[in-house]
Image (cartoon, rainbow, N blue to C red):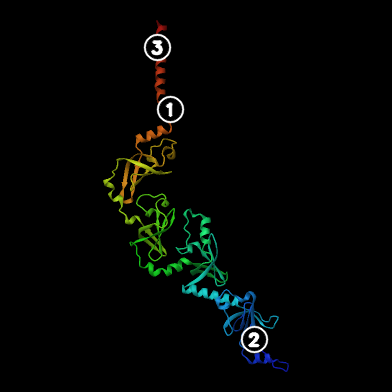
Amino acid sequence: MKKKIVENENQTEFDKLLAASDLTMPQVGDVVLCKVLAASKTEVKLDINGILTGVVRGRELYSEADEYAKLKPGDEIEATVVDAENENGELELSFRQAGQEKTWQSLEDTMNNKTTVKVKVVDANRGGLLVIYLQVPGFLPVSQLSPENYPRISGGDKSKILEKLKSLVGLDLEVKVISLDRKEQKLVVSEKDAWQEAKKDLMSQYQIGNAVEGTITAITNFGVFVNFGDNLEGLIHISELAWQRIEDPFELYKVGDKIKAEIISIDGSKIFLSAKRLLTDPWKEIAAKYQVSQIVKGTILKINPYGLFVELDKDIHGLAHISQCGLSAGQRLSTAFKIGEVIDFRIVSIEAGDHRLGLEVPHEEAEAKTAAESPELVEGVVEDEEKPKKKAKKVKEENEETVEERLEAGS
């Protein structure tokens, strides 16, 4: 609302000038356009339409943004009124509040237009990175990090994950805004979305079935990550490393190794690879090596509650289910068999298409296992078998004695 000035004899020159102009008296909270009169590190003097003088000082200088930190006389800038009149009769203004409004508006435009912005990482916690865009704080969840910065820690060690995240503090990251709430002062950003946008044209050059060669950049208990092409990255899951079963990728690979693989899936920024697809499938020729009912030597690789994983050769592995291991009542797999042990197995099924081969422990082998584990049990069984025979013999002898006694008594 315009301040109406009634002319009278006591009216000052300022009041006359104000009344003659079309200036609305700024109120607390208003954003006004100002011209810089003088600027220093401690305060900035401002002119408002040649009528009013304002000042910005202290924390309201808002030096985080270049727009406000490099002001010089003659520059036009917006400021927010925080006091209609200070101790010197000037408007007390703030760049900070005006800057916040402009920043939130900028962020809204960025999210609506799906463009990227640059944020600075100021801290980290186990959930992700604390970032700041100009004066607005935000959060970048771990799940929204780009493949380059995602913490791939074997075993998911939380302290090591946090250490990796802390190493990103101080960096500037290109991100996209994925969630914004000005009222709640919440900002969530994604580096992954910005990375995906930047790599979109490059990723379009690749299709499922393409063969690539790259360098292993990280190894985890679930597979290896491979960098290929123009800084693209893919994952070879442990099940896609080789046709045979692999327990620990660390035993076969190291960071820096070269590896060839085939692209088997592209899901947004995620690229999945397979090394075994470029290798000859040994199961296609299995009929020439193994047949059902054949007795074969096998090395026990792993003992699970449900059976034994067995290596027949470097390419073909099989499973002997617990029900096919010939265990006696109360006997355990972990005590009857040992990892690394080589024993005879009988092949009970072959499903080449599904890469499955079923095994059983032959009866003779199982008996030997039982005897080796508990010889006293076998002796007990033999002893038990002899008891009925001994009892029958004793009864027979007793009956014979009774007959003889009766004969003698009758004679």
Disc 3, SS: helix
Instruction: Rate crowding at label 3 as few (under 14), some (14 to 19) or many (20 or more) other CA atoms within 10 Å.
Output: few
Task: Tell me the distance, in whole angstroms, between the alpha carbons under discs 1 and 2.
Answer: 111 Å
Q: Earlier in the sequence, mark 1 or mark 2?
A: 2
Q: Is residue 35 left or right of residue 296?
A: right
Q: Earlier in the sequence, mark 1 or mark 3?
A: 1
Instruction: Say which quarter of the image contains residue 382.
Output: top left
Disc 2, SS: strand
Task: Residue type at mark 1: give it.
Answer: Gly
Does the image show residue 107? yes
Looking at the figure, which quarter contains the C terminus?
Answer: top left
Seen at 39% across and 22% down, the residue is: 389
Vertical placement of 29 versus 387: above or below? below
* Front position among marks 1 and 3: 1
Q: Is residue 112 left or right of residue 92?
A: left
Task: Residue type at mark 2: give it.
Answer: Leu
Residue 65 in the image, given as x and y percentages of width and height: 56, 75
Disc 2: which residue: 52
**Extreme residue toward the bottom, this view:** 9
Instruction: Say which quarter of the image contains residue 401.
Output: top left
Task: Tell me the distance, in whole angstroms, between the alpha carbons under discs 2 and 3.
Answer: 142 Å
* Front position among marks 1 and 2: 2
Disc 1: which residue: 380
Residue 286 in the image, given as x and y percentages of width and height: 29, 47
Residue 385 in the image, given as x and y percentages of width and height: 40, 25
Disc 3: which residue: 403
Q: Say which of 40 and 24 sits in front.
A: 40
Seen at 49% across and 74% down, the residue is: 110
Evaluate if marks 1 and 2 touch, with contact meaning CB atoms under 8 Å apart: no
Evaluate if marks 1 and 3 touch, with contact meaning CB atoms under 8 Å apart: no
